[in-house]
Amino acid sequence: MGFKYLKDAVTLKLDTDKCIGCGMCEIVCPHSVFLIKNNIAVLTDRDKCMECGACSMNCPVSAITVRKGVGCAYAVLMGMFKEDGCGGGPSCGGSGCC
Amino acid sequence: MDILGAWKTRWGIGRMTYTINPGLYSVGCPDQYSPVLVTSNYKLTVDKVRKNLSGRNLWVLVLDTKGINVWCAAGKGTFGTEELIARIDQEGLKEKVVHRELILPQLGATGVSAHEIKKRSGFKVEYGPVRAENIPYFLDNGKRLNPSMREVSFPLFDRLVLTPVEIVIAMDLMLRVFGVMAILSALGILPVERADYLGLIGAVITGTFLSPLLLPWIPGRAFSFKGMLTGLIWAVSYILFLYSKGYTGSLQLFSYLLILPSLSAFFSMNFTGSSTYTSLSGVEKEIKTALPIILAALVAGILTRIISLF
Ligand code: SF4
Ligand code: SF4
């Protein structure tokens, strides 16, 4: 079953001019967001991206940018109420997530 | 909000006993040509990897991820480029094997940069399957996988086992609310009824259990919206039930229509953290839209209920 979260919310960007078609993004993405077509990476469905950052970490030519983060409402809410900002964006610990 | 802290500690304490020492382990009788698998030092992960490798000869390089599983550790960076490079040196891996290839779990890719590893250590990183049970397939098929073995799914069973944590966290909060309600009632300030408690418990269950379970079949994409729908169904059923039992206070019944769906929406929204496909940007967007509505409906509902008591 293909789960999909909100429409047009993610920060994922692919610069096809830089892409050398190595296929790494297609391998690491846990939601099959990338496909290599004619030796170049294309986005199948951006809305399936969960911003895990695996693709941008492993693109050898930095053709992919994405703001890496954990999609956890608890963490985001905590970040809103707690101002001490221990750095490094929201991280979780509440429910089943990390 | 020390609920979270308490949970962290509880998890933390449990976690220590589930740690194994980082280092290079052998499965069977590996030699200098045997493949090297990399994993976290979360004991359950190592056990799973070992179980799926029985009868083979391999090296398993266990990184120090503080006993956290690969996915979470990679997100935090402990299953990461630096740790892997340091561990390769420390274990003298270059002397143990003649090849220069490492097999990493795909979910570790979030913390590891394959080309960095190659550049700095000479080892080529191959990403294996998401689930350990597919490692044999990967090894036996020239390090190729079916696309489905590269995908993270979120099946019914996985959602089911995650719900108890959600229920406990939600009830932790609700018991405080119930405490306040009981005190107000005992002091004669607000005559809270049993129907109030039951309605709220029902909303916790729809939000933390029903919504996660029925996730793919509930319309909408936002978790709060899904939770609002299940909560609405509960509210309407409960109101009809109370009505049939002789409750006729329309203000009271109307207040449930506001309170129960918003509570259910809130708890469903918190399931985003347990899900395997929500993004940070998406969650921020959802909270920005849903939270004001939830709070407004909740306040309006509580006020309505208080007015109905007089
Ligand atoms: S951030 Fe993660 S989910 Fe999104 S496209 Fe990259 S690898 Fe896929
Ligand atoms: S990892 Fe980068 S270079 Fe390789 S195919 Fe993907 S976008 Fe292109």
Image (cartoon, helix red, strand yellow):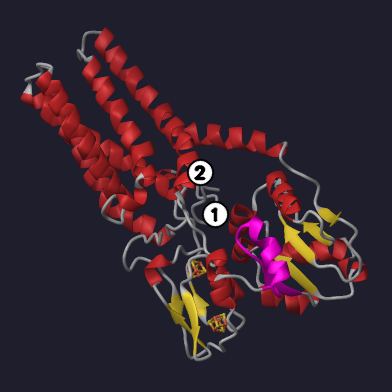
Residue B161: image location, x then y, percent: 50, 40
Residue A24: image location, x then y, percent: 59, 78
- Residue A73 visible, this angle: no
| Residue plotted at (74% across, 61% down) | B38
Give the amino acid type for the residue marked by disc 2 in the picture: Gly
Q: Nearer the viewer, residue B30 or B115?
A: B30
Q: Which mark is residue B116?
A: none
| Residue plotted at (76% across, 62% down) | B37
Give the amino acid type for the residue marked by disc 1 in the picture: Gly
Above or below, A33 against B131 in this view is below
Disc 1 marks which residue? A87
Tell me which segment is drawn in magenta.
Answer: B124-143
Q: Quadrant of the N terminus of chain B?
A: top left
Disc 2 marks which residue? A96
Whether ligand 1 has any atom under 8 Å from the Cβ at mark 1 is answered as no
Q: Nearer the viewer, residue B189 or B88?
A: B88
In this picture, residue B91 sits left or right of residue B19: right
Above or below, B297 against A42 in this view is above
Q: Are marks 2 and 1 on the same chain?
A: yes
Q: If you read the primary sequence from the N terminus, does the residue marked by circle 2 or circle 1 appear first?
A: 1
